[in-house]
Image (cartoon, grey):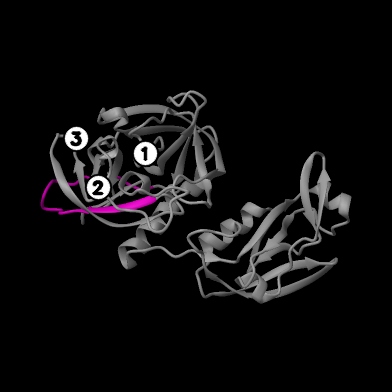
Amino acid sequence: MRSGGVVTIYAYFDERPATEHAAQGSGFVVSREGYVLTSAHVVTTAGPDEQGEPEVADRVYVGFRDGDRVEAAVIGWDLFDDVAVLKVDPDAHELDPVPLGDSSRVVVGEPVAALGSPFGNESSLSVGVVSATRRSISSLTSRYNVGDALQTDAPITHGNSGGPLFDARGRVIGINAQIRSESGQSEGVGFAIPINAAKRSLGQLVRNGRVAYAYVGINAEDLTPTIAKRFGYPVQRGAVIASVVPKGPGEEAGLRGGSDQRQVNGLPVRVGGDVVVKIGDREVESADDLVRVVSERLAPGQVVRFTILRDGRRMVVPVQLGERPRRPEVED
């Protein structure tokens, strides 16, 4: 296992109460230039209910496997995917970068290992399998959901945040982020930010010091075969626009939200809105597909062609994308 590149992150917040003065997490070295990936919630005060910009730690240190500790600078953070980039002086300590994998190729059932510093115990290893992919989970650092999260049964505990989730070949496929547990302990369901999303954040943060996500300003729901049959949609899959943000890119382009709230098999469904079936050359079969294409494939300012169904007719609507705001009026 590539434990030489896995590090412990120590973040100090001078103005916080003594009980919240220090935070500890994990991270991993990704380049010989000194860049380190970790979770944004380890080195900032970011949270889903945070007002304004979060505070960044006053001092951050990176601890290596040999016990040595060096100071790190916070290059930037991505609140939407809970990723932060640090940088250490490459001459301050020998660096052993870990190889990054491809999270889009991860399959359910493959073995994984989480490495980090739970409860301050450096280089602790826990193992399991990928139990699901493409999960949409609540973010610890914003009000948007994190898409394409990897679900694992490998125990993830306090202090694992920001550490790597390795595949069987020793490549990082995710950043350990959070756990859902009835007890609050390590038993439960763990989630990791896919490494492909973290790579995107890393590139933007190193180049620009910030990240920018494309934004449509619509809230969509899944179109399923049952809903399609019930309400006479001509397709069985797609993303039904439930609502549109006033003065947002979607409204400016003329996209329409639903007008009627119904119940289908115990679930609320808003009908009457446009059905998005394609964005550019990419098929859209669900609301998650819509978010995935916009956030992962597109950029603010782009004009992209949305193929929609409106009153049974297929239309192409050009939409000039905006930049995702910090606090959404609706999910995009």
- Other-residue count near label 2 (Cα within 10 Å), few / some / many at <14 / 14–19 / ≥20: few
The answer to whether any part of residue 285 appears in the image is: no
Q: Quadrant of residue 128?
A: top left
Residue 80: percent from left, percent from top: 46, 54
Q: Mark on residue 111?
A: none
Magenta segment boundaries in residue numbering = 83-100
Task: State the residue position of label 2.
Answer: 15
Mark 3 vs 2: CB contact within 8 A: no
Residue 83: percent from left, percent from top: 38, 51
The answer to whether any part of residue 176 appears in the image is: yes
- Amino acid type of disc 3? Arg
Q: Nearer the viewer, mark 1 or mark 2?
A: 2
Q: Mark on residue 65?
A: 3
Residue at the spot 42% in from the left edge and 40% down from the top edge:
177
Instruction: Measure how far apart labels 1 and 2 are at the Cα level.
Output: 23 Å
Q: Nearer the viewer, mark 3 or mark 2?
A: 2
- Which is nearer the N-term, disc 3 or disc 2? 2
Residue at the spot 76% in from the left edge and 64% down from the top edge:
274
Q: Nearer the viewer, residue 102 or 178?
A: 178
The local secondary structure at tag 2 comes to loop
Task: State the residue position of label 1.
Answer: 161
- Amino acid type of disc 2? Glu
Instruction: Measure how far apart labels 1 and 3 are at the Cα level.
Output: 17 Å
Q: Nearer the viewer, mark 1 or mark 3?
A: 1
Q: Quadrant of residue 41?
A: top left
